Amino acid sequence: MPRASTTSTRRAAILRWLGASVLRAVVVLWASATLVFFITRLVPGDPAEAALGGPGSQASEEAVDAVRRQFGFDQPLPVQYGIAMLSLLRLDLGTSYALRQPVATILADAVPGTLLLAVLSLVVAWVLALGLTLAQAHGSRIAARIGDTVEIVASALPHFWLATILIAVFSTALSWLPPVSNGTAAGLVLPVVTLAIPIAGFLAQVMRGSLAEALDSPFAISARARGETRMGLVTRHALRHAALPALGLSAWAFGYLIGGAVVVETIFARPGLGRTLLSAITVRDIPVVTGVVLVSALVYVVLTMATDALTRLLDPRTAGGSR
């Protein structure tokens, strides 16, 4: 096929992939916003009363009516939904009922801390998963069984239990690390490890299975016939193939880490999206809840696109039109 035709086909495939990815991102964000809107309206209680501090505030009926009119709670539900969607189209997330601040300002303060926590946790998880995979790669049956057990146990550990054990060992017994996030690098270690260990278990299981398939592939048999050692075959050839499925799971893993931040940030008293979401749910602060969910969904779809693009770059066979 002429080079110009091949380039044109590849460019068309990239544009189709980009268009489909953007469309999926829009659908995910719209579905997330719609789901949060109806769930928050189905929760028992008067949102106008919640905006005034809940039943304990003893707000007058006139004040509650004024808040209903101010936020449109006196309108029919379809009208409220339409107003909410139009506001989001204008990138207007509204004002927090509890803090009386723009939601965008609250999120701008909370997002960096959670993103730092999630990124570091994902990096540590990948390092642990690669270490586990390589430790089992030399073919020892005992090492494979130990690694298999470690992966299963690690992936099953709940965050609250793991955080409690890590605090008891490294803060209370050994006094090596602070039990709460104090703004230092040392205060970040336990939250990162708490989030990273379960994800490392999942990633290692995926990589180990893919590595076994890669080692049975024709290219691996050919490499062995040329005298390649097992570890050389793993590190120079098979590990890249084994990492591709785990790489595809990284976007899901990052979303899982953002969700896990709710528990971890609360336990370690660390400011971020998780604690902001928990506080907003407690006082039924609908605009903040909606904002946190949308930011989390946006991060997820962006990462999904990034990991998809990286997978296509590492393995061009996954790019349909570029063969």
Image (cartoon, rainbow, N blue to C red):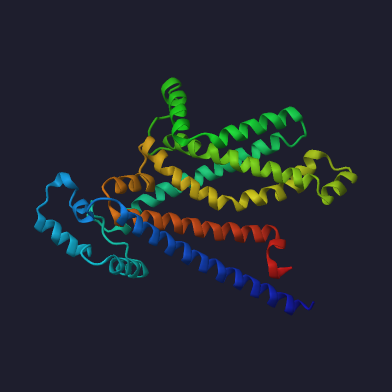
Seen in the picture, residue 117 relative to 313 is either above or below; the reply is above
Residue 93 horizontal/vertical position (percent): 32, 62
Frontmost residue, 121 versus 318? 318
Seen in the picture, residue 5 relative to 91 is either above or below; the reply is below
Query: What residue do we see at 9% from left, 53% from top?
Result: 60
Which of the 4 quarters of the picture holds residue 175? top left
Frontmost residue, 313 versus 55? 55
Residue 289 horizontal/vertical position (percent): 34, 53
Residue 268 at least partly seen = no
Q: Is 122 left or right of 218, judged from the image as shown?
A: left
Query: What residue do we see at 70% from left, 30% from top?
Result: 145
Q: Is 188 left or right of 74, judged from the image as shown?
A: right
Frontmost residue, 275 versus 240? 275
Frontmost residue, 197 versus 158? 158
In the rendered image, the quadrant that contains the C terminus is bottom right
Residue 71 horizontal/vertical position (percent): 22, 63
